[in-house]
Image (cartoon, grey):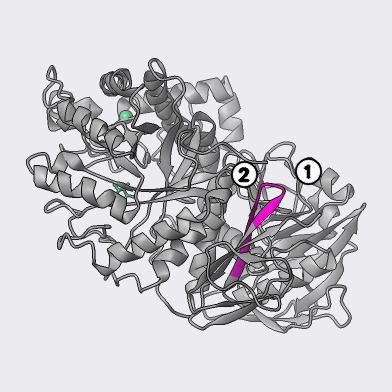
Amino acid sequence: MRYPPLNPRHSHLIHGADWNPDQWLERPDILDEDFALFPRAGLDHLSVGIFAWAAVQPAPDVWNFDWLDRIMDRLAAAGRFAILATPSAGKPAWLAQAHPEVQRVWEAGNRSEIGGRMNHCWTSPVFRERVAEVDHRLAERYSRHPALAMWHVSNEASGACYCELCRAEWHHWLQRKYGSLAELNRRWWTPFWSHAYSDWTQIDPKDHCLDGMWLDWRRFTSEHIAGFLGHEIAALRRHCPLVPVTSNFMGSVPDLDYWRFAPVLDVISNDAYPVYQPGEHLWIQASNDAFNFDLDRSLKGNRPWLCMESSPSTINWAGPAKLKRPGIHALEMLQNIAHGADGVCYFQWRQGRGGHEKYHGAVLGHDRDPSARVFREVQDVSTMLGKLDDVVGTPVPAEVGLIFDWESDWAIRSGSGIRERRPGLPWGQTAYQGACKDHYRGAWGNGLPVQMINGDGDPAPFTLLIAPAMYLLRPGMAERLAAWVRGGGILISTYLCGMVDEDNLVLEGGWPGQGLSEVFGVRYQEIDFLPDADRVPLAPVPANSLGWEVTVDATDVCCLLRSLGAETIASYGGEFYAGTPAITAHRYGAGTAYFIGAQLPAAELVDLYRRIADRHGLRRAIPGRLPLGVTAQVRSDGATEHVFLLNFTGIGQTIEVGPGCTNALGGPGPADGRMVLAAHGVAVLRRTTQP
Ligand code: GLA
Ligand code: ZN
């Protein structure tokens, strides 16, 4: 099985960059140099027009597409493609001045000043009309242009607007959802601090006291922004029904539910600036980014996606910016491909001479020197991508699923007590995504490819499903998972599982609720949250069914579990709950459900997942055991597989890859079934799919 290429007229992996010719229109020498150097760098796609609104519409009734016509024509003549952006993320000063209502109102109540970017209102009819007009003119002009590969709308769309227009939309959204204030008051638990509402307009999204509102405001904002993307796409589609549309995401950004965005887009694209520096924690960071990359692929159900932005060298916004060390660039770019990207692009092609990003990394620096180190590393990536045409369109064969559900994240954060001085659960801000990324790493460290679903997703395609901190249960979720385990599924969940319903109201009768206690064979009602330095030892139970023999210290959170028939794999070895279960396994129907009640250190969690994978005979990317910090990922069309070996450690590693593999990048292949990876090295092996 193979998906069509992201750009239907380009059957290779995409290699591209953001390019801002609109900053250089007075410098034909620079534009000539750009066109001379694109092929030398090996860039075939250029993202243009992202912030070019004022350049195409310098005044309300003045349009100037001449420069863009020339750019598009030159791209086509040079055999390059444009990922043509709509300019909605940054608006012209004249528009903001003439219509202050297009400017976003922030949570603090202040309206944006003229300037900046991504600071518009999502509702303003004037803004929507103006955006539709510029989009419509772009589509009318370029929809049949030979350089056009893809549309890119609303660069990094994000952030809520609190203006009167957006508040009115919010109130309508609530009316549609709840029908009556009585229903809303009941589901939001409004007797709390005398919140009962008697009029819709009283409902102020800035009030953080009601956990139900906290969730709904994020649901509304996600749908509202996705609706804005849909508005832009409709304007393009009038003239251009076929060219695919994307919008660039920002990993697992906490306040937007990308599951709600994905359906309006044809292609998922992502921006990632991981700042990989050699060191003992690199593999932890790398697996966190791998999580985001797998999420990008999963948002449209295992479909290849595009890395829209990454830095070829340094970044300008994250503290002291060390340079990207030699070799790391290829590792980072092939990591994207390993997890399903069908191309990698950079921010930015060339450093501008002015503006806030003039020192941000670029393929071509201020020295304009194509023999510079960074330029050569980009050329190396280009050479590697050129050898991987067979990878284009291939999905990832994942036997392991992972539930990633933004609503659990929001719900845990709403109860965290970290915002303001509210009572509630401590440690919450990062608890959910931390749990998801920790447990994902258990699979990553064992070369088990993963696909994400949200809580409403179908577990049927998976052998093993990881549901870290599955705090919020919407109707149907618990029943669906229970039925799937009964039928033979292997489910893993953790602390903070099954505690609230879709309205963020706590489930009564002990956790995990809604029948999940029977599935896991455990129940808990007390959670011990540990301050930073506190540790609680965990001791393996002799002769446990996983053969787990590790003594380990838990951090941050320990659920006090009571067994309802589950086997104890490890129990707490300290505190007043010493001797009670911490990690359990439970046969349920034909399946097994594991509960991991405490937060474990990374290396030991990888070891625990290795034992679970062994016990249930899960298929790994390679047969041998992976050294800590090395992962193996697979892409497959069903007949041929590409195995990506990525070494995030600072030492050379020898990996047992089994028979029948050749080196897809050229150079020495495996000898005696072993492949040698340099420090921070990467290899891509090709083999025939084993039945
Ligand atoms: C974001 C934006 C880009 C640029 C980069 C810099 O990802 O989309 O326009 O500002 O950050 O890292
Ligand atoms: Zn607004």
When the figure is inspected, residue 501 is found, relative to residue 58, above or below; the finding is below
Residue 688 coordinates in the image, percent (x, y) = 72, 57
Q: Is residue 633 magenta?
A: yes
Q: CA distance from mark 1 to mark 2?
A: 15 Å
- Identified by mark 2, the residue type is Asn
In the image, is 19 to the left or to the right of 190? left
Residue 577 visible (yes or no): yes
Q: Which residue appears farthest toward the left when viewing the image? A: 26
In the image, is 231 to the left or to the right of 437? left
Disc 1 marks which residue?
A: 460
Q: Quadrant of residue 315?
A: bottom left
Q: Tell which of 312 and 300 is nearer to you.
A: 312
Q: Quadrant of residue 615?
A: bottom right
Q: In terms of sequence position, does the residue under pointer 1 or pointer 2 come before the other?
A: 2
Disc 2 marks which residue?
A: 302
Label 2 element class: loop
In the image, is 168 to the left or to the right of 479? left
Is the distance from the Cβ of mark 1 to the nearest ligand 1 atom less than 8 Å? no
Label 1 element class: loop
State which quarter of the image contains the C terminus: bottom right
Q: Main secondary structure of the magenta part?
A: strand
Residue 601 visible (yes or no): no
Highlighted magenta segment, given as a residue range: 631-641
> Disc count in the image?
2
